[in-house]
Amino acid sequence: MIFVTVGHELGFDRLIEAVDKYAKTHPEITFFAQVGSLNETSYIPQHIGHSEFVTPAKFESLFENADLIVAHAGMGSIITALTRQRPLLIMPRRGHLMETRNDHQVATAARFRSREGVFVADDETVFSDVLDEVLDIIGNTKLKKTSEFADTSLISAIRNFIHND
Amino acid sequence: MKAKEMVKKKVLAVSSAGGHWVQLRRLRLAWVNDCNVTYVTTKEEYRDEVFKDPEIVTTDDVRFVTIVAANRWQKLKLIWQLMSIAWLILKIRPDVVISTGAAAGYFALRLGKMMGARTIWVDSIANAEVMSLSGQRVEKYADLWLTQWEHLSSASENGPQYKGAVV
């Protein structure tokens, strides 16, 4: 099962449409997508199960059962995939398309693409090719566990600041 | 032990929902159990993970409060959010205010500073090329002003400091 998530707020039509097209030609793969707030102009997927939002419990179980996570390049999705040891394919939202306020997700994607288990599709035109490659690779990789917590140095700095006034 | 040391520090930990919240929670070892913490965020659904946290010994020192979500284009909601935060700060009188963003955190640091709290800003790791807008604007009100990217940090006292990242 592939779990698709666009984060807790806005929809992300380019990604959902790319996934929907892929699902149409790959009926053997099960997809479920959390698509964000829909409006009159939103793309409505035809070939994948979807809902606007899911409860934290449902989110956990989808993550748990997913072979791959497909997401926008948001930090919540990235951190969750890393800590749950799930391979992740991200596509950045773009500022000029009004998908978010600026191109910070492009920078995030660039910074995280070197992490083990994180793959990037720069846009919808390359999405299906990248997804093909990723599905080929992930069967053979065992991901390392990422800590539930921030770097010890950062936690110490904050702890010291709190206690040393 | 002096009486003063026996009183737990009061920490107000503030963030909007989503990635900012996930990052704030990853810092919690800095305050769990030896501080009295109030989490302030914009999604009620996070309550469970706060109180079912295996790291906490007792829930007596943990509070969870939700405020209205607002982005920078929603003026009325922003005002409502600001007033809720002001009320919480007046009520709680935190010793320390910490935030990972965004608007709610900016308000909390400014108001906290006004009320004599010490303040920490941890700019979101999503801002790899330039500090977030709230992060830039909060500079004057942050006693500890942190970026999670070493290349954005400054060697001088004035710029953002780098102490590590949430992931």
Image (cartoon, grey):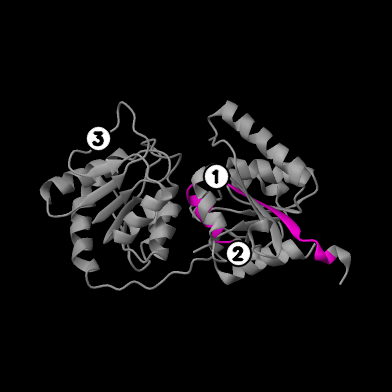
Query: Amino acid under label 2?
Result: Ile
Residue pictured at 64% horizontal, 64% vertical: B30
Query: A26 or A97, which is in the foreground?
Result: A26
- Between the C-alphas of marks 1 and 2, the distance is 22 Å
Q: Which mark is residue A72?
A: none
Question: Tag 2, which chain?
Answer: B
User: Mark 2 or mark 3: which is in front?
Assistant: 2
* Category of crowding for the residue at label 2, using alpha-carbon neighbours closer than 10 angstroms: few (below 14), some (14–19), many (at least 20): some
Q: Quadrant of residue A64?
A: bottom left
Residue pictured at 72% horizontal, 47% vertical: B141
- Between the C-alphas of marks 2 and 3, the distance is 42 Å
Residue A116 x, y percent position in the rendering: 35, 69
Query: B166 or B145, which is in the foreground?
Result: B166
SS at mark 3 in the image: loop
* Residue of label 1: B16
Give above or below for A165 relative to A47: below
* Residue of label 2: B56
Question: Tag 3, which chain?
Answer: A
Of the 4 image quadrants, the one containing the N terminus of chain B is: bottom right
Q: Quadrant of residue A150?
A: bottom right
Residue pictured at 76% horizontal, 61% vertical: B8
Q: Which mark is residue A44?
A: 3
Query: Amino acid under label 1?
Result: Ser
Of callouts 1 and 2, the N-terminal one:
1
Question: Tag 1, which chain?
Answer: B
Residue B141 sits inside the magenta stretch: no
Residue A126 x, y percent position in the rendering: 22, 51
Residue B25 sits inside the magenta stretch: yes
Q: Are marks 1 and 2 on the same chain?
A: yes
Give above or below for A77 relative to B41: below
SS at mark 2 in the image: loop
